[in-house]
Image (cartoon, rainbow, N blue to C red):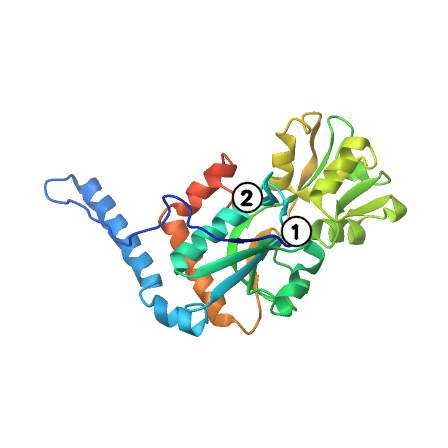
């Protein structure tokens, strides 16, 4: 699963860095609102007032910035019917590259080797809905978060009383994720705990009855639950707030690149591009 594709700028998201407000003859509230817009534009401009210097320090100006995602974690990243990468992570990556004014290449990498590929310098960053954990921070550096999500159990409607009722049942999660670690460390499942290479495989096992419940990020589960296949299923128990922040991973030595990405994330939020991408996939804010 290593398809490659040159990134393109998302339609309508390239900010021009300018803002204008007519203040004469307006009520005080309108003047204040105009001043607020100007302040936000000034802040956005200051974040990228020296893009060339930042790019040079982060070594991204005259080379291709290589970014990895998984390609099997809808709606955040997936391969469509043509084999092209799509999803929230992918659109967000395109927007970051447009704001940073860099040439980017996006590659699909299996989840269980995605950090290894970054450390081995096969690419420069990971945008793959990766939770920030202490264990991962020993291997890579993380940017500021770009969304947050708790974990939830998913099972057939009315099949469980609550989260504690999941104990002793056949339960699954994607391997090498915070969900799987939570189950492995916090519940005495033993052989009833199933690890899957992708969430697509986990959902397939849920549909066939191989497992009675799966644990995953709530936003990923929400996409499954609104699908035709997921109509007989629902969330079980309360949200689990463990390692909820999702961020971009870079190598520890690439601090300048990390800071450049942080500035781009902030700008996308300020100019409304983040919200535009958010609304494409979710009718509520995931930030």
Residue 2 quadrant: bottom right
Towards the viewer: 101 or 188: 101
* Label 2 vs label 1, nearer the camera: 2
Residue wearing tag 1: 242
Residue 3 in the image, given as x and y percentages of width and height? 61, 52
Please tell me which residue lies in front, 134 or 275. Answer: 275
Q: Position of residue 66 (x, y in %)?
A: 53, 62
Q: Position of residue 168 (x, y in %)?
A: 86, 40
- Distance from Cα at disc 2 to Cα at disc 1: 24 Å
Q: Secondary structure at mark 2?
A: loop
Vertical order, 254 against 204 (above or below): below
**Most distant residue in the left direction:** 25
Q: Position of residue 269 (x, y in %)?
A: 41, 50
Q: Residues within 10 Å of mark 1 (few under 14, many from 20)?
A: some
Q: Is residue 182 visible?
A: yes
Identity of the residue drawn at 52% across and 43% down: 286
Q: Hey, which quadrant is residue 203 in on the image?
A: top right
- Label 2: which residue? 87
Q: Earlier in the sequence, mark 2 or mark 1?
A: 2
Residue under the image location 79 percent in, 54 percent down: 185
Q: Residue furthest front?
A: 82
Identify the element where label 1 is drawn: loop
């Amino acid at each position: 699963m290593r398809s490659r594709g040159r990134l393109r700028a998302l339609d309508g998201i390239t900010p021009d860095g300018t803002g204008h407000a007519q203040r004469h003859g307006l009520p005080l509230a309108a003047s204040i609102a105009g001043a607020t817009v100007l302040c936000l534009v000034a802040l956005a401009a200051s974040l990228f007032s020296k893009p060339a210097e930042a790019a040079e320090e982060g070594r991204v100006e005259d080379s291709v910035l290589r970014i990895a995602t998984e390609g099997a974690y809808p709606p955040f990243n997936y391969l469509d019917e043509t084999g092209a990468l799509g999803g929230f992570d992918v659109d967000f990556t395109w927007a970051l590259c447009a704001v940073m004014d860099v040439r980017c290449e996006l590659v699909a990498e299996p989840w269980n080797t995605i950090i290894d590929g970054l450390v081995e310098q096969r690419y420069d960053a990971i945008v793959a809905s990766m939770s920030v954990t202490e264990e991962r921070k020993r291997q890579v550096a993380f940017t500021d978060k770009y969304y947050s999500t708790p974990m939830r159990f998913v099972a057939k409607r009315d099949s469980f009383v609550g989260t504690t009722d999941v104990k002793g049942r056949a339960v699954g999660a994607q391997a090498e994720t915070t969900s799987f670690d939570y189950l492995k460390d916090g519940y005495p499942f033993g052989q009833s705990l199933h690890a899957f290479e992708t969430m697509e495989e986990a959902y397939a096992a849920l549909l066939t009855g191989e497992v009675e419940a799966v644990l995953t990020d709530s936003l990923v589960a929400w996409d499954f639950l609104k699908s035709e296949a997921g109509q007989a299923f629902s969330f079980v128990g309360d949200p689990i707030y463990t390692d909820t922040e999702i961020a971009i991973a870079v190598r520890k030595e690439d601090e300048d690149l990390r800071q450049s990405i942080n500035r781009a994330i902030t700008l996308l939020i300020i100019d409304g591009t983040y919200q535009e991408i958010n609304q494409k996939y979710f009718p509520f804010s995931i930030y």
